[in-house]
Image (cartoon, helix red, strand yellow):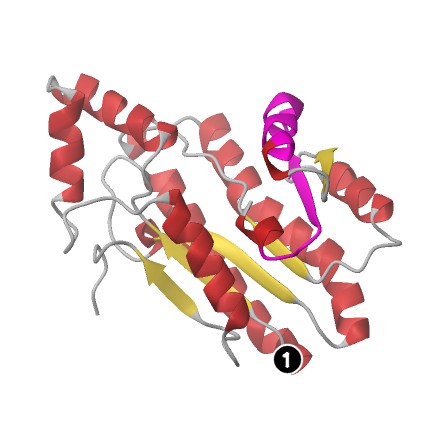
Amino acid sequence: MALAGGGARVVLTGRQRVTLDAVAEEIGPNVRVATVDTSAEGSVAALAESLAGEQVSILVNNAGVAGPVAPLTDVSVDDWDEVFAVNVRGVFLMCRAFLPPMLARGEGDIINLASVSGKRPLARRTPYTASKMAVIGLTTTLAHEVGHLGGALITLKTRPVSGPRMERNFAREAARAGTPPAAAEAEFVGRSAMKRMVTEAEVAAAVLGMLAMPGPTAADIDLSAGMVAR
């Protein structure tokens, strides 16, 4: 919505058409919707083919799943593979599909959403943390491959972002610990300097700000209310 408000023609992609249509309705007429599973090679290829006549100048890889909240010894192989399929393979497939036209034009911007969990421990979240470390490595390495493009290839590490996903995480953690969800939330946000969560609006503003920055390629930016300091 922020990109559309800034004048971009937006293509919304995701697995749930109902959700996409609801967001498109809020944005208005300057938007397209495509049901895509970014973890599936054929689905991504079909998306790229459908946009072959368009100039895709900005790619924001924001699809992700939280995965299980459990000790590593209790994580199933299927759960591990699902997290990596969406969080890592999806970023790889989308970058691979949309980079060639950007390289041919000599311009384009890619922002990959990661997490500060990729830089600090997060107990009982091994698949998620490992996947976000992989996204950071993918982004910074790819930036050195295509830095001559001249655009932005950035990792934006967010955490914690307020919303339904974090509420579900707090509920699961509370059930495990036998405490109220509010206590799980307070313990989590207490690790940040600002003692609060980041908002969706702040993430959107950060994306717009990074697109306006000169020379940010290979940047690895924290937006964590001070949860990561170095």
**Regarding mark 1 in the picture, which secondary structure is present there?**
loop
Residue 187 percent coordinates (x, y) = 11, 37
Q: Quadrant of residue 58?
A: bottom right
Q: Is residue 222 visible?
A: yes
84 in relation to 35, above or below:
below
Extreme residue in the right direction: 53
Q: Is residue 208 left or right of residue 103?
A: left
Quarter of the figure with the N terminus: top right
- Residue type at mark 1 is Gly
Read off the residue under disc 1.
Answer: 150
- Which residue is drawn at the image coordinates 48% and 67% (left, top)? 210
Q: Position of residue 215 (x, y in %)?
A: 52, 81
Q: Is residue 28 above or below residue 222?
A: above
Residue 216 position in % (x across, y down):
49, 76
In the image, 92 versus 71, the foreground residue is 92
**Can residue 136 be spotted in the picture?**
no
Front-most of residues 203 and 167: 203
Q: Is 143 on the left or on the right of 21, as rendered?
A: left
For the C terminus, the quadrant is bottom left
Side of 225 where 186 appears, left or right: left
Q: Residue at x 50, y 61 (%)?
A: 208
Q: Nearer the viewer, residue 150 or 206?
A: 206
Residue 26 in the magenta stretch? The answer is no
Q: Which residues are magenta?
A: 6-25
**Is residue 23 highlighted in magenta?**
yes
Residue at x 14%, y 56% (from the top left corner): 193
Question: Mark 1 Cα within 10 Å, few/some/many (few <14, many 20+)?
Answer: some
Which quadrant holds residue 23? Answer: top right
Tell me the residue at 44%/47% (across/down): 131
Q: Relative to 211, say whether 65 is above or below.
A: above
Residue 172 horizontal/vertical position (percent): 26, 22
